[in-house]
Image (cartoon, helix red, strand yellow):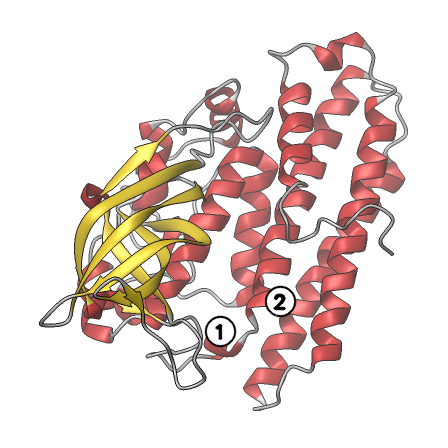
Amino acid sequence: MIKISIQNDHIAMIMPEEIRNKMLGACEVSQEIMTSIHEQRLLQIWVPKKYGGLGFRLKEGLSVLFEWSKIDGSLGWMLTLCSGANFFSRNLKPNVASTLFANPKTCFGGSGMIGGTAEKQSNGIFLINGLWHFATGAPHLSHFTLNATLTENGNPLLDESGTGIIRSFVISKDQAEIIPNWKSMGMKATGTYSFKVNNAKVSKDYSFVYDEFFTEDVLDKIPFRIFADLTLLVNYLGMATHFSEEAIKIRPNLGLKLFNKMINDELEKAFQFADEIEMLLNNFELISSDKQTEIHCFSTDLVKKLSHQILEIYFQLGLRATHTDSEIYQIFCDYFTATQHANFRKEFGEE
């Protein structure tokens, strides 16, 4: 049974198998599942405890994300990206973060692209306009995050080097128009949609810079590349585990012991990296570029290896695995949709 938080003895329990049944063929995470997620504050695993979040350590959070992606790929992916967006609680001024995350249903999500402008007004107000794509969890967000080019009187604002200034903002969901345009074969229940903003007035207090923090925690110092690599990687490992579980139901004599051992061994290696990173940072040591490259290469190579092995297994499952209403087919589509994320995707022929 899925229960992470122990703060509330009255949290409604939903068994993993029940969640899987509800997610099979779903186009959106059900309200019942979302209620349980909010009650457990699972979208706030990286939000500091002083703001009401769970304040998990890196390995602890990765373990949660793995378990949920093992239940369902769309669900794990949505939790990963939305909890990752809530990490920005650390970049907001403490009074703003405390106010926003006093609500257990506060959930950030948005786009990493630069899709619009923020026109500087008087009294610290910006007028935001633009279109952004791939905001995971859009139907469930309380706030959207976005990157915009700062302008004044229609002209880009420049820094001291003459470069245009980009600023990140947090806006209420009421200030955004969701465009439900997800057409991919998998990850259909992630709610990954575009959103448009038209003349939204936002205070500068609701803007932030990625590498400026108002909290003092080891997690603040984790390079974003490592955070992205490890949080996404456990999703692929979770989906691969789920795929193996369903594959053996179709062909009980299929030899998957080595595949399962590889998943377990590589998951443990990812956890070891998490422990190593926190240990280095606790000792006030910098994370070298070589260490970042090591973790990225490990993650990229593992996703490639998992993908080839999942294909090899899929080739042995027969027509049952092609039924569009089957669990194995949904996992297959979710996994290979997720592999198209730019983080681990290499150019053809690149080594």
Q: Residue furthest bottom?
A: 284
Residue 316, quarter of picture = top right
Q: Where residue 226 is drawn, which disc sits there?
A: 2
**Marks 2 and 1, Cα distance to the nearest angstrom?**
11 Å
> Which amino acid, by three-letter code, is at mark 1?
Leu
Marks 2,1: beta carbons within 8 A: no
Q: Position of residue 303 (x, y in %)?
A: 75, 47
Can you say whether 58 is above or below 9 in the image? below
Q: Where residue 219 is drawn, which disc sits there?
A: 1
Left or right of 89 on screen, residue 190: right
Residue 224, quarter of picture = bottom right
Q: Is residue 169 visible?
A: yes
Residue pictured at 32% horizontal, 73% vertical:
157
Give the quarter of the figure containing the C terminus. Answer: bottom right
Q: Position of residue 18 (x, y in %)?
A: 48, 24
Residue pictured at 50% horizontal, 20% vertical:
21
Front-most of residues 122 and 276: 122
Crowding at dot 1, Cα within 10 Å, few <14 / some 14-19 / many 20+, comes out as many
Q: Nearer the viewer, mark 2 or mark 1?
A: 2
Can you say whether 229 is above or below 65 in the image? below
Residue pictured at 68% horizontal, 9% vertical:
323
Left or right of 87 on screen, residue 259: right
Q: Earlier in the sequence, mark 2 or mark 1?
A: 1
- Dot 2: what SS? helix
Can you say whether 77 is above or below 205 in the image? above
Residue 283, quarter of picture = bottom right
Q: Position of residue 204 (x, y in %)?
A: 21, 69
Left or right of 268 on screen, residue 40: left
